[in-house]
Amino acid sequence: MTGLHVRAMAVWTPRFPSLDAWRARAASEPSTPPAAILGARARGRASMLTRMISEVATSAAQAASIELGRVPLIVGSAYGEMETTSQLLTMMGEGDGTLSPARFQSSVHNAAAGLLSITTGNQGFSTCIAAGDATAAALLIEAQAWLAEHGGAVLVILAEERLPGFFAHNETFEPAAAALVLSAAPDSALAELEMGQRVPGVAVRAEHPELGRTPVAPLLALIDAVSDAESDVLVPAFSAALRIVLRYKAAP
């Protein structure tokens, strides 16, 4: 299989609103993602999940010097637009005729990717994955398959908002988003990833010290490993784990 070369990375959380802040673990007062690429009207209607996805997509594309309107998009969220879905279900339960078609349109799991594509005029490949704890691994496998067939570069994004109300059960975690620009060629790469070895008996998702049990944690761990030149990372996949080995590290 084609290697995955990491060209750029991005992170956004309410308390760590940039890759540099995340790397330094320099927490700030909680904020909302600017998502400046979205128009004012779209930004005002956008969910937290959509804003986070737009924010890290912009940051990663800028860091890799690629056009956001041309790069293939591989977008994931373990649960999707749950806040919007919760609002929609509340309207349905009230039964007072206030059900919003626009809100329904924004409740589907590919809403953020669609809005980002429309905003940037991107008419290329786009796919969205919602696979629970396997989402991070599924995104990387999808990227590897695409690059093996087409080459070039892809933008991989994983984001999760805080689960609302009755959806949460025992799931408590902070909103977070992470993005990687991956390519088939080593030019300007920070690292090369070797994937594929399954490691049974590994916890599917562990508690993250800063963010709780976020499904974004595997991608954040990968970003930390690339930043710190670690050689081995486990990304949860189903009941086992997908082992990722960093084979190449560019000089600082």
Image (tube, rainbow, N blue to C red):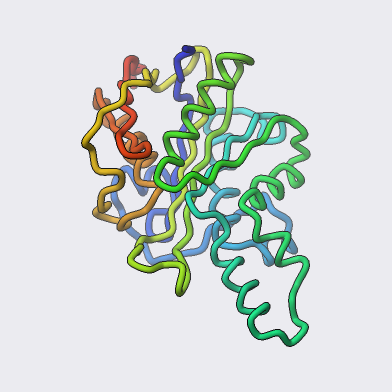
In the displayed structure image, the side of residue 105 where residue 142 appears, left or right:
left
Q: Nearer the viewer, residue 24 or 86?
A: 86
Position of the C terminus, as image quadrant, is: top left
- Which residue corresponds to the image point at 26% horizontal and 49% vertical from the top-left? 206
- Which residue corresponds to the image point at 48% horizontal and 59% vertical from the top-left? 161
Q: Position of residue 119 (x, y in %)?
A: 74, 47
In the image, is residue 146 above or below residue 96?
above
How many numbered marks are there?
0
In the image, is residue 52 above or below residue 164?
above
Q: Position of residue 131 (x, y in %)?
A: 48, 44
What is the quadrant of residue 64 in the picture?
top right
In the image, is residue 122 above or below residue 95?
above
**Residue that extends furthest to the left in the rendered view of this protein:** 201
- Which residue corresponds to the image point at 67% horizontal and 31% vertical from the top-left? 67
In the image, is residue 112 above or below residue 229?
below
- Which residue corresponds to the image point at 76% horizontal and 45% vertical from the top-left? 118
Q: Position of residue 52 (x, y in %)?
A: 54, 53
What is the quadrant of residue 50 in the picture?
bottom right
Q: Position of residue 62 (x, y in %)?
A: 57, 35
